[in-house]
Amino acid sequence: MKVVVLGANGQVGHELVGALAPCAEVTALGRRGGDLADLDGLRETLRALRPDAVVNAASYNDVDAAEREPHAALRVNRDAVELLGREALHLRFALVHYSTDFVFDGRGKRPYVETDEPSPLGAYGRSKLAGERALEALGAPAIVFRTAWVYSLRRKSFVSTMLKLGRSRPHLRVVSDQVGSPTFCRDLAVATALVLHRHRDGAFEAFLEARGIYHLAGSGAVSRAELARATLALARHPEGQPIAEVEDVPTSAFPLPAARPAYAPLDGEKTRTRLGVALPPWRESLARALADEERP
């Protein structure tokens, strides 16, 4: 199976290359050769490679910058995604695309399911929703995984930032009124690889049948502040170094250009029953991620 990974230098893309390597012939593309802002170049690359599957782990994901440059976000998150859908139909390849909990406004009281009506609060969420709808309108052979709070320890993320700050400061102020589903990038990559491997024979047809939106995020829900506490409690610290104290503060304490959904955990039951994959509880994944960090 020939798989192209777009965004191969990012959190999820890096893990995807490793997860797919044992079961596929992987072409890993970063900005060079796989720039989603260069639509003509992207089309030429796909037609030259003629893959069996494409995993799009690239996106315009600077939530605050999107408020200043919404057209740039739309070009990557909508226009390039639409191109991928068209090329998937033309070249007959299966497509995996990642979307986000930011398509919701976060005003609900229970984890979101796929049939809940999206209502994004900002330009980033609107651009990601536009990409979802472009694939749906095309009837593309695409599985769209909405995920949330993706973190890595090798790249800047909420968890890696809390770890760094917690080892250098005695006191952290972290928002407690944002609740979501933390997702370890490696778990997301492995689940994606499993879905592709199961459909390695006839991937195009299988994805046409299964096409649509699926939620795939760490199981459970937690606030940003509690996630910070859990990160510091599970991490190893130099002998004698106290664990930083985490103070709960409201989102209003850190005013930012883009609004964040307050309560947006994702329910993954549809993904488990229809695709046969589910991510572990968020605390279990966090412990494993931090244990990996300590290995020589």
Image (spheres, helix red, strand yellow):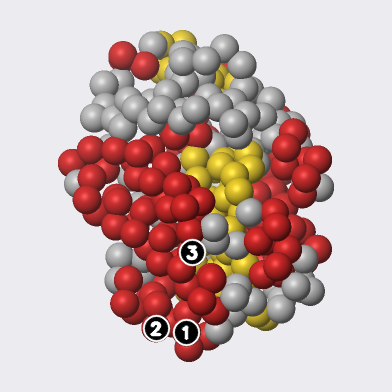
Residue bearing the label numbered 2: 44
Residue 142 visible, this angle: yes
What residue is drawn where x is 48% and y is 73%?
87
Q: Residue 41's x, y, as percent? A: 34, 79
- Does 75 appear above or below 200? above
Q: Nearer the viewer, residue 13 or 35?
A: 35
Q: Which mark is in front, 2 or 3?
A: 3
- Tell me, for residue 80, which label it has, or none: none
Residue bearing the label numbered 1: 47
| Label 2–label 3 contact, CB within 8 A | no
Mark 1: few, some, or many residues within 10 Å (few <14, many ≥20)?
Answer: few
Horizontally, residue 119 falls left or right of residue 180, namely left
What residue is drawn where x is 50% and y is 28%?
117
What residue is drawn where x is 39% and y is 75%?
42
* Quadrant of the drawing holding the C terminus: bottom right
Q: Secondary structure at mark 1?
A: helix
Q: Which mark is in front, 3 or 1?
A: 3
Q: What amino acid is at disc 1?
A: Arg
Q: Splitting the image into 4 quarters, where does residue 28 fall?
A: bottom right
Q: Earlier in the sequence, mark 3 or mark 1?
A: 1
| Label 2–label 1 contact, CB within 8 A | yes
Distance in Å between CA atoms under marks 3 and 1: 13 Å
Q: Nearer the viewer, residue 241 or 139?
A: 139
Q: Earlier in the sequence, mark 2 or mark 3?
A: 2
Residue bearing the label numbered 3: 85
Horizontally, residue 254 falls left or right of residue 189, namely left
* Residue that extends furthest to the left in the rendered view of this protein: 68
* Quadrant of the drawing holding the N terminus: bottom right
Q: What amino acid is at disc 3?
A: Gly
